[in-house]
Amino acid sequence: MGWSSKSPATQRWDGKGAPGDEDSVVDLSSGQAWAVAAPTTQSLAGYTSATIRASAASHPCPATPQINQTITVGGAPARPLTMQCPRGSGFLVEVATTVHHGTGYLFASQNPSGNGSQRADRTAFREFLGGIRFWR
């Protein structure tokens, strides 16, 4: 699946907080996936930790994701984070963070109905991430 924004951001993200799919700072792709980006001086670890804290503060997400590994997105090291918000709800939220040339990127996807296969949701999100390319 390639990136094809059907609803581009109307405002610039300041890199703070945890934007959701309907916020004016996000670009939406097909389905329930979105992305935000902002300049950062943080390392990937710092950016990921800040993302986890912001998600827990802004949404009913756990302070510790269920999955927190290392992968690559667009050739850059990235951290995929899987959470149920709130815990045990079946509302699966997939997030991936990466820092590339001084820009922090947050890619996210959610299954708001809680229905369907979480394995399929994870697979679809990983396929989405596999299509990300940085042009810089």
Image (cartoon, rainbow, N blue to C red):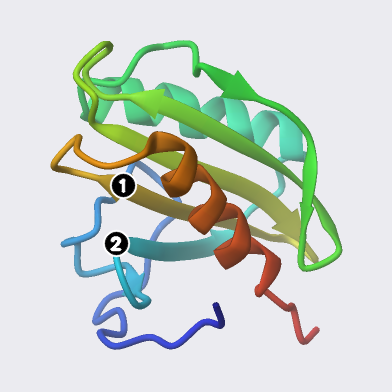
Image point (32%, 33%), residue name: 92
Q: CA distance from mark 1 to mark 2?
A: 6 Å
Q: Position of residue 20 (x, y in %)?
A: 25, 51
Do labels 1 and 2 touch, CB within 8 Å? yes
Is residue 105 rendered to the left or right of residue 4?
right
Q: Position of residue 100 (x, y in %)?
A: 77, 62
Is residue 5 rendered to the left or right of residue 80?
left
Residue 9: quadrant of the picture: bottom left
Residue at which label 1 appears: 110
Q: Secondary structure at mark 1?
A: strand
Q: Position of residue 70 (x, y in %)?
A: 78, 35
Quadrant for the C terminus, please: bottom right
Image point (61%, 33%), residue name: 48
Q: Secondary structure at mark 2?
A: loop
Please, is residue 46 above or below residue 87 in the view?
A: below
Task: Give the amino acid at mark 2.
Answer: Gln
Quadrant for the N terminus, please: bottom right
Residue at which label 2 appears: 32
Image point (33%, 42%), residue name: 18
Mark 1 Cα-neighbour bin, 10 Å: few <14, some 14–19, many ≥20: many
